[in-house]
Amino acid sequence: MEVPAATTLSQTRYRIAELILEFNHPVDYPLSELLPSFRDFQWQDLTEETNICITISQGSAPEAEDMGLLRTDESIAWGDRFRFYERADGFVTTIVNEQGDGLWYLHSERNFKNSTLFIPSSDVAEQGAVITWMAMMIFGQASLLHNTIMIHASVVNHQGRGVAFLGKSGTGKSTHSRLWLQHIPDSVLLNDDNPAVRITSEGVCIYGTPWSGKTPCYKNEKLPLQGFVRLQQAPINEFEWQTGLKGFIAVLPSCTSIRWNKELFSNMNTILEKIIAQVPVGYLKCLPDAAAAMLCHSALFPDE
């Protein structure tokens, strides 16, 4: 599934969590305009090694009698237009376009390092949304080869250190971040949905990414990770540290990995074990009030 040799390609690169994501695309394809949330992550250095590559083709999806084994057709973002298949040579993701007469078709290697995306006829808004989403999905898998995990979290930058709030959708992660911004001095939002956590030579760090859910917060920043806090709505405010296996279990549901790739899933668990050994994990039963933010802050920053 290579793009025909006659196609002239241009390279657009982004540096996200210190990893190089490269798009190979037709010269006249307005990729940068379609991906405004990536703007602060654009990377001009062509000498640095590419970690993740996505090749874009403006052609029809390849015809195949056997798409592979259907792994899931469930998607909050794309509803019943979405399918995800596993094949011997990798994974295939498809999304029917809004008009219903074309197919977004993504083929990824098993480790997601290289992918090819076939773009159907669709409007500009859909092109930007689908490419942004597919890039997030690819990055979330391929980054596992580089001591990096994408997590579902809202992250506050407090005095140059990151705090990641975890929980099921609707738990109040974004609300709790806003309470910090309102009531804890020197606090700003880093990312509101999909930050990246990486083990570095400096310790465990958390990064802003081009993916921040419904909140437009796309900061190309890196912070030491002060701690994870899993939230649970409750009629009281109560904070408890989670050590060892409890800490692992508290963070695991928020990590991005597809369970059908045993190697990548194993990598994720190994990386998470190393992260939990260095980063404290708290559990906060809370009300959506200032007292909850203050309690959480005092636990994570006892010297302030």
Image: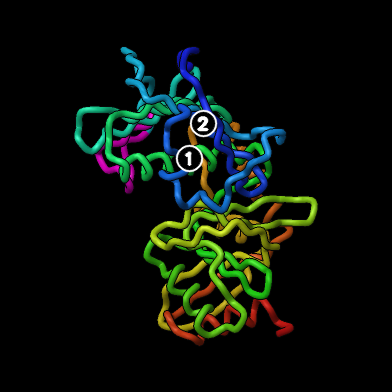
**Magenta-tinted stretch:** 72-84
Query: Where is residue 41 shown, x and y percent of the image?
Result: 58, 49
Query: Where is residue 118 shown, x and y percent of the image?
Result: 38, 26
Determine the secondary structure under disc 2: strand
Q: Which colour assignment does the render follow?
A: rainbow
296 in relation to 282, above or below: below
> Which image quadrant: the C terminus?
bottom right
Tag 2 residue: 54
Rounded to the nearest whole Å, what is the CA distance between mark 1 and mark 2?
Answer: 8 Å
Task: Report which quarter residue 85 is drawn in.
Answer: top left
- Name the kind of residue labelled 2 in the image: Ile
Between 237 and 296, the residue placed more toward the observer is 296
Tag 1 residue: 135
Q: Residue at x 44, y 69 (%)?
A: 174
N-terminal of the two: label 1 or label 2?
A: 2
Label 2: few (<14), some (14–19) or many (≥20) C-alpha neighbours in 10 Å: many
- Does residue 169 appear to the left or right of 153 in the view shown? left
Check the image and name the residue furthest to the right.
201
- Does residue 296 appear to the left or right of 120 in the view shown? right
Q: Residue at x 45, y 28 (%)?
A: 56
Check the image and name the residue furthest to the front.
28
- The answer to whether residue 255 is magenta is no
- Name the kind of residue labelled 1 in the image: Ala
